[in-house]
Image (cartoon, rainbow, N blue to C red):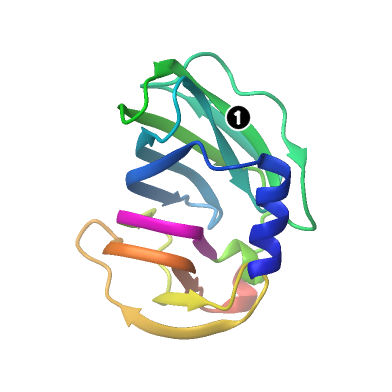
Amino acid sequence: RSGAAAEVAGVLGPRRHQTVSLHDHVYVGADRKPARTRTMQVVEAIVEGLDRIPYLYDTNAVTLEVGQGCAGAPGPFRRIGDVVYVTDIPLAHSLALGETLTLEYWTSYHYDGNPADPEEREYRRAVMNTLENFDMRIEFHPDQVPTAVWWAVWDGVEGPVLEQEQVTLDSQHSAHRYLRSLERSVVGFHWRWEPACAML
């Protein structure tokens, strides 16, 4: 929503970078819980001396580990809205205006583990501005393959699904979607387990 984007922008201030490309690889474990996401992100500085980028999530039940292109551990999450938490990822070196850097980081999840909860049967990416070259892949443990998986677009972070398309998993029990560009959207995968009562 425009109000949510304005709220975040009001806390973080003017944008200092743009994302040139973004790849999310999500892994769902044998316990049917989202376990980890590996993210590769290429950022470009749109100001002089960019030394960190914000990392936003709609929960603080995550652990963030950093690798390539990152310097030091990120700080604690702080709440900046009704459903938004943020921390900073320090960069390996300060970027000059127009300079790019490839970042690699991992997000681990600490959910309660209720597969009947729709929020634990989805992975979404929210884009408040414009994102080019976005790639998302979700992989399931071979012992716990869902009955059905959909690619979907949501009406904001808290809204319902606006449109969806059922997808077929490949031989690696994964689904993939590439978008050349994305603007002010929430997109991702959601899935269903059968029978629903088996894990309750």
Quarter of the image with the N terminus in it:
bottom right
Span of residues in magenta = 122-133
Which picture quadrant has residue 48?
Answer: top left
**CA neighbours of label 1 inside 10 A, class few (<14), some (14 to 19), many (20+):** some
When the figure is inspected, residue 24 is found, relative to residue 194, above or below; the finding is above
**Where residue 25 appears, x then y in whole percent?**
36, 48
**Residue 169, quarter of picture:** bottom left
Please give left or right for residue 139 compared with residue 58 in the image. left
Q: Is residue 102 magenta?
A: no
Query: Closer to the camera, 43 or 137?
Result: 43
Identified at 65% across, 33% down, the residue is 87
In this rendering, would 14 be left or right of 188? right
Residue farthest along the left direction in this orientation: 171
Which residue is at 66% across, 53% downward? 58
Name the kind of residue labelled 1 in the image.
Asp
Q: Is residue 103 visible?
A: yes
Image-based side of 19 in relation to 4, left or right = left
Examine the rendered structure and indicate whether residue 167 appears above or below residue 124. Answer: below
Relative image position of residue 85 (x, y in whole percent): 71, 45
Q: Residue at x 60, y 23 (%)?
A: 74
Quadrant in which the C terminus is drawn = bottom right
> Which of these two is toward me, 118 or 60?
60
Q: Secondary structure at mark 1?
A: strand
Q: Position of residue 190 (x, y in %)?
A: 48, 71
| Chief SS of the magenta region | strand
The total of numbered circles placed on residues is 1
Q: Residue at label 1?
A: 88
Res 84 seen here: no
Residue 24 at what x, y percent from top left? 38, 48
User: Does 129 appear in magenta?
Assistant: yes
